[in-house]
Amino acid sequence: MPLPIETERLIIRSPSFEDVEAFHDIMTDERVTEFLPIDPNASIEESRRRAERRMQHEVAHGFTLWTVVDRATGEIAGACGFFLVEGVGPEIELAYHFSADHWNKGFATEAAIACLRFGFEELKLGRIVAMTFPENFASRRVLEKVGMTLERKAEYYGRDMVVYAIEDPNDISAA
């Protein structure tokens, strides 16, 4: 299942510089960034630098936060994929964020399931974690729906988080 990953409604592909404007719009929306442990993008140049870091991360590690495209419209819906926890690992984190226009459509769940399968089957990961703010009930619900289990509370990225994990690809939910 090499990239792109295709699901019924989504295409998950490597990021590119053509995505910068769409991600700049997404990452300057306070509704989207409210529950992210990073600051909103301050400028289009910062968005371009973040895109470049994602591309470099994929080359270095074989994974990154990939671009998620809505197959029906061709629009960039958001991002989903993996990165090293706090940028250093060793744990690998599943993460996602979507434009507010693409909320409540099941896209986060669909993308997370596809990425988890890719992580276990193609990347041969043995364990995948995910973190979110305790009060981000929508994200917690996604993590539970895809088969991840709440493990603990911990501080990551300088914030109090809840940590979910999955080690067995058979636990991935079909949601």
Image (tube, rainbow, N blue to C red):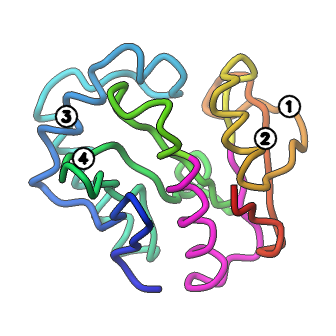
- The disc labelled 1 sits on which kind of residue? Lys
- The disc labelled 4 sits on which kind of residue? Ile
Compared to residue 169, the image places residue 166 above or below, namely above
Q: Position of residue 16 (x, y in %)?
A: 17, 60
Determine whether label 1 and label 3 are within 8 Å by CB: no
* Cα distance in 3D space between marks 1 and 3: 31 Å
Image quadrant in which the C terminus is located: bottom right
* Cα distance in 3D space between marks 4 and 1: 32 Å
Q: Which residue is mark 4?
A: 76
Classify mark 1: helix, strand or loop.
strand
What stretch of residues is rendered in magenta?
Answer: 109-130
Q: Which residue is mark 1?
A: 153
Q: Position of residue 144 (x, y in %)?
A: 78, 44
Q: Which residue is mark 3?
A: 46
Task: Name which of mark 4 and mark 1 comes first in the sequence.
Answer: 4
Mark nearest the camera among 2 and 4 is: 4
Q: Which residue is mark 2?
A: 163
- The disc labelled 2 sits on which kind of residue? Val
Mark nearest the camera among 4 and 3 is: 4
Determine whether label 2 and label 4 are within 8 Å by CB: no
Q: Is residue 8 magenta?
A: no
Determine whether label 2 and label 1 are within 8 Å by CB: yes
